[in-house]
Image (cartoon, helix red, strand yellow):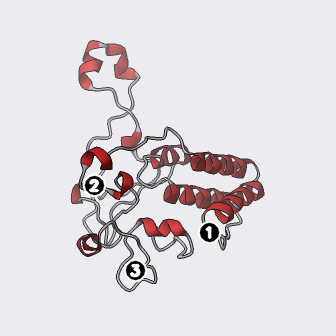
């Protein structure tokens, strides 16, 4: 994902660039020591208020937006792309060029590729904000967490073919025992359905 972001897109500075990268000296750190202690690709997106990482009463003061206007632009672009791919492409290009990267160009031409590009740009924009869940479910996307170089915990290195079953809410057994009608109306239990990727 990181490699796919253009170096001209300022959002790429939200992660620690690997050594030797053209962006390695451009990434802003609160303190020089953090540059040494953080691994490559560590997130720098979320920072303490006023850059104060010592006085918690200052640093932890923050706002929690329910919905950012950027998310609305991407929702509009995706909805348009499902109906008229050229319009969706135009909307994402307009947003990106005006607000994120003046040299941006959407090279996709097919509808599914345009939708994927819009969702990819939305993933970058909203990284760490918990919005990917809805895109994966709505678009039946696969999840890939097991691969060479992954930083997911070994038990979480799970790859799926299509939407992960763990995203379906399953009513717990205790409730089913108290309400037998749920035996025939519950989502399937995904327990044991996936095995973590081990590199083979």
Q: Residues within 10 Å of mark 1 (few under 14, many from 20)?
A: some
Q: CA distance from mark 3 to mark 1?
A: 19 Å
| Mark closer to the observer (1, 2) | 1
Q: Secondary structure at mark 1?
A: loop
Look at the picture and state if 138 lies above or below 122. above
Residue 147 image position (x, y, % from top left): 34, 68
Seen at 66% across and 70% down, the residue is 102
- Pick whichever of labels 3 and 1 is earlier in the sequence: 3
Seen at 35% across and 58% down, the residue is 51
* Closest to the observer, 173 or 52: 52
Q: CA distance from mark 2 to mark 3?
A: 29 Å
Q: Tell me if residue 27 can be seen.
A: yes
Seen at 67% across and 58% down, the residue is 95
Q: Quadrant of the C terminus?
A: bottom left
Residue 112 image position (x, y, % from top left): 64, 58
- Residue at numbered disc 1: 101
Instruction: Point out which mark residue 156 bears.
Output: 2
- Residue at numbered disc 3: 24
- Pick whichever of labels 2 and 3 is earlier in the sequence: 3
Residue 61 image position (x, y, % from top left): 35, 44
Residue 93 image position (x, y, % from top left): 69, 63
Q: Residues within 10 Å of mark 3 (few under 14, many from 20)?
A: some
The answer to whether mark 3 and mark 1 are in CB contact below 8 A is no
Q: CA distance from mark 1 to mark 2?
A: 33 Å
Locate residue 115: give its quadrant: bottom right
């Amino acid at each position: 994902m990181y490699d796919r972001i253009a170096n001209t897109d300022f959002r790429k500075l939200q992660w620690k660039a690997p050594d030797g990268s053209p962006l390695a000296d451009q990434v802003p750190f609160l303190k020089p020591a953090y540059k040494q202690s953080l691994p490559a690709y560590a997130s720098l997106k979320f920072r303490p208020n006023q850059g104060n990482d010592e006085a918690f009463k200052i640093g932890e003061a923050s706002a929690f937006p329910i919905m950012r206007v950027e998310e609305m632009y991407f929702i509009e672009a995706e909805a348009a792309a499902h109906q008229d791919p050229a319009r969706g492409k135009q909307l994402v290009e307009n947003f990106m060029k005006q607000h994120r990267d003046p040299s941006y160009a959407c090279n996709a031409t097919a509808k599914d590729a345009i939708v994927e590009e819009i969702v990819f740009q939305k993933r970058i924009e909203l990284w760490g904000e918990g919005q990917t869940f809805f895109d994966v479910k709505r678009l039946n996307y696969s999840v890939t967490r097991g691969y060479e170089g992954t930083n997911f915990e070994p038990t979480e290195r799970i790859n799926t073919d299509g939407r992960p079953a763990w995203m379906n809410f399953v009513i717990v057994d205790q409730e089913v025992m108290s309400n037998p009608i749920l035996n025939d109306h519950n989502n399937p239990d995904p327990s044991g359905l996936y095995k973590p990727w081990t590199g083979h």
